[in-house]
Image (cartoon, rainbow, N blue to C red):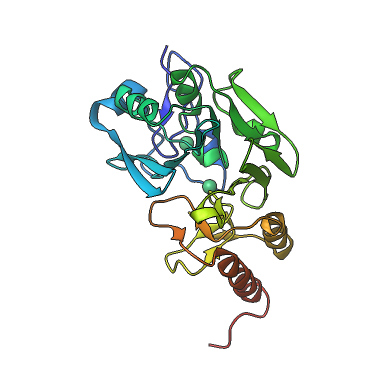
Amino acid sequence: MPHYICTTCGVQFSATAEPPEHCLICEDERQYVNPTGQTWITLAELRADHTNSFKPQEPNLIGIGTEPTFAIGQRALLVQRPEGNVLWDCISLIDQATIDQIQALGGLSAIAISHPHFYSGMVEWSHAFGGVPIYLHAANRKWVMRPDPVIVYWDSPTYSLGRGLTLINGGGHFPGSAILHWADGAEGRGVLLSGDTIFVVPDTRYVTFMYSYPNFIPLPAPAVERIVQAVEPFAYDRIYSIWFDRVVTADAKGAVARSKARYLRAISEGFAS
Ligand SMILES: [Zn+2]
Ligand SMILES: [Zn+2]
């Protein structure tokens, strides 16, 4: 039986004879059901006309995205380190060419994911690399559409993935929304891989913090404060958000501070003109 994949959010479901009736992730108000109707694809069908491309971002960080764009246009980030490579966030497509390329880069020791919009093909990816653990925050457990023993739920403000990598629960977009702090990134100044807990906007001197990005539903002030406080103890100078072009390349801590101030002003007194 195939593991059907939702074409709108890219999540892969447990095996069923027929496509599922609903995609719970898309029916949630943080996402949307395709206006032309819910549609599904199998991994074999996805492999037939899509490929993954690898794009170096900085030393020891490689972006992996699918072409042509599929679902939300997710891209994963491979953090390379001597203790074992970690895949941050995930995409729906995994094929032999991708497996070979990652093995040539040192393989994969773990997967960690920011939130349900990136659960995508996580179990398929784990199994392709011998069942490496997938680290998810426990508060997002109900959004796992393909449960599997490889999933490790963490439930604490932070969770260490070994030297230099720390998962941070920021909440906001989802209760279990996570950010990965990579201490060695940005030439040792530190990097946040923020998913869309902290979302880099087109003016990349700024970020934003939303309950729903496609539906433009903001967060209340306490939730924004909580996200910023969660990352405050960590040194970072750069932020990689969810797409290839959404990167704060420098002074990311300043970008978060001025973006928080602008956001809180917008949802309280607003702007004069
Ligand atoms: Zn979906
Ligand atoms: Zn999201």
Question: Percent position (x, y) of residue 255?
Answer: 56, 68
Q: Report whether residue 136 is seen.
A: yes
> Where residue 221 sits in the image (x, y, percent)?
71, 65
Q: How many marks?
A: 0
Q: Is residue 224 above or below residue 258?
A: above
Tell which of 175 and 238 is nearer to you. 238
Where residue 120 appears, x then y in whole percent? 47, 33
Quadrant that contains the N terminus: top left
**Residue at the spot 53% in from the left edge and 27% down from the top edge:** 109
- The residue at 68%/30% (across/down) is 153
Q: Residue at x 54, y 67 (%)?
A: 251
Query: Considering depth in this image, is 97 or 12 the residue closer to the camera?
Result: 97
The single residue placed furthest to the left in the displayed view is 49
Q: Is residue 4 above or below residue 221?
A: above
Determine which quarter of the picture holds residue 73.
Answer: top left
Q: Nearer the viewer, residue 257 or 29?
A: 257
The reply, left or right, for residue 154 in relation to residue 258 is right
Question: For this view, does 31 lie left or right of residue 52?
Answer: right
Q: Give residue 94's position: percent from left, percent from top.
A: 37, 27
Q: Nearer the viewer, residue 270 or 163?
A: 163
Q: Using the rendered view, name the quadrant where residue 40 is placed.
A: top left
Q: Is residue 199 placed above or below 164 in the rendered structure? A: below
